[in-house]
Image: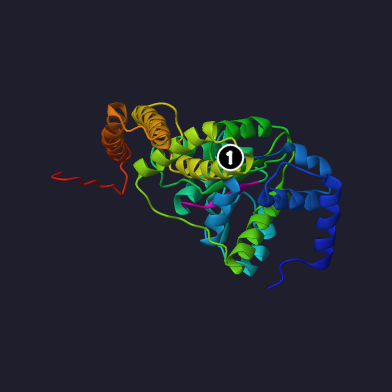
Amino acid sequence: MDLDHPIFSESVRRIRQWLGPTDLDPVQQELLERLVHSSGDLAIAADLRFSAGACGLGLEALAAGAVILTDTAMAAAAVAPMARRTFANPVRCILEWAPAVAPPGGTRSAEGMTAALAACPGAVVLIGSAPTALERLLDQLDQPGGSQRPALVIGMPVGFVGVAESKRRLAASGWPQIRLEGSKGGAGLVGASCNALLRRAWLNARDGRPLPRVPVPVGELIDKLTILTIKRERILEPERARHVSEEFDQLQAVARQLGLGTDQGPLAELSRQLEGVNRQLWDVEEEIRAGERAGCFDTAFIALARSVYLLNDQRAALKRRINEQSGSALVEEKSYGED
């Protein structure tokens, strides 16, 4: 299936030439090019923002058939043709759930958002016109529990009343997001953003590129993030550092989607303790390697080797406590000797 009309392809070629080099990754670049094509505005590049791993989460959700939830019928109409031609994602407008009359002091969009999120967990949410809907979505994300959490928010409400405030709040939320700063936005632009992700997810699937989704205990996820944090500090060779950052960003985005992105509370404290243990392990293993290179296997070397399993016991205990605190559906089991 050819997703691109020749005129669109030529337009993108010219847009890419006019934009020149950017610091965006390939998927972000494609999304920017589609926004420029839809708006006719090259300056839009300065206002486009992505949270870490947002595009990857969007690709995964759309390829899995996630509902695309829009704040207006116009945005739904902009996305529906591409959805039909790719993964046949359901495209729904929050106004389907809205009351016929807005409540006093409120909006139909905000009321519709509350009900729509409950009906469509894991949706890709597009907001191009209604900052009150974005505010209500963020209110829902502040609530405990994860049943109403979307996979990705594309927040681009347009206008001058409440728009900048809602975008600032979205930025501060840490939720997986793609947004336009300032007053720019609209149904056409959120639709273009979603279409860019649908197109890329479809081409990846057609080309056989995997979008891995491996279930692991929460403690294992946090453990991996702490190790990647250490690697980001200590691996300096540019290509290897890029790989580490890409992996960290993807896993950090998953952690945030699960509501694990806070720096406060008992889970955060356990995560910090786990990072401390992993830092000790890193240093011990470096000293062991240095001893092996020097051929020095004295009592100090033996003590270092023994400390590895002691530290790994601490590490396993912390991961178990994280699983218990988070209510992880999966739990990692360890067994050594007579344990």
Q: Which residues are magenta?
A: 121-127
Q: Is residue 126 left or right of residue 119?
A: right
Q: Secondary structure at mark 1?
A: helix
Reading the image, the residue beneath label 1 is 241
Q: Residues within 10 Å of mark 1 (few under 14, many from 20)?
A: some
Query: Is 146 within the magenta?
Result: no
Task: Report the front residue among 150 and 254.
Answer: 254
- In the rendering, at what x and y percent does residue 117 appear? 49, 48
Number of numbered discs overlaid on the protein picture:
1
Which part of the image, by quadrant, shows the N terminus? bottom right
Figure check: 199 above or below 267:
below
In the shown orientation, is residue 58 left or right of residue 287? right
Q: Nearer the viewer, residue 139 or 229?
A: 229
- Residue type, mark 1 in image: Ala
Estimate the x, y position of residue 264 in percent, counting from the top left.
Answer: 41, 26
Q: Quadrant of the C terminus?
A: top left
Left or right of 326 in this view: 246: right
Whether residue 113 is visible to the viewer of this picture, yes or no, is yes
Q: Relative to the observer, which residue lies in front, 164 or 110?
A: 164
Q: Is residue 124 magenta?
A: yes
Question: Residue 262 location, x and y as percent?
Answer: 45, 31
The image quadrant that residue 145 belongs to is top left
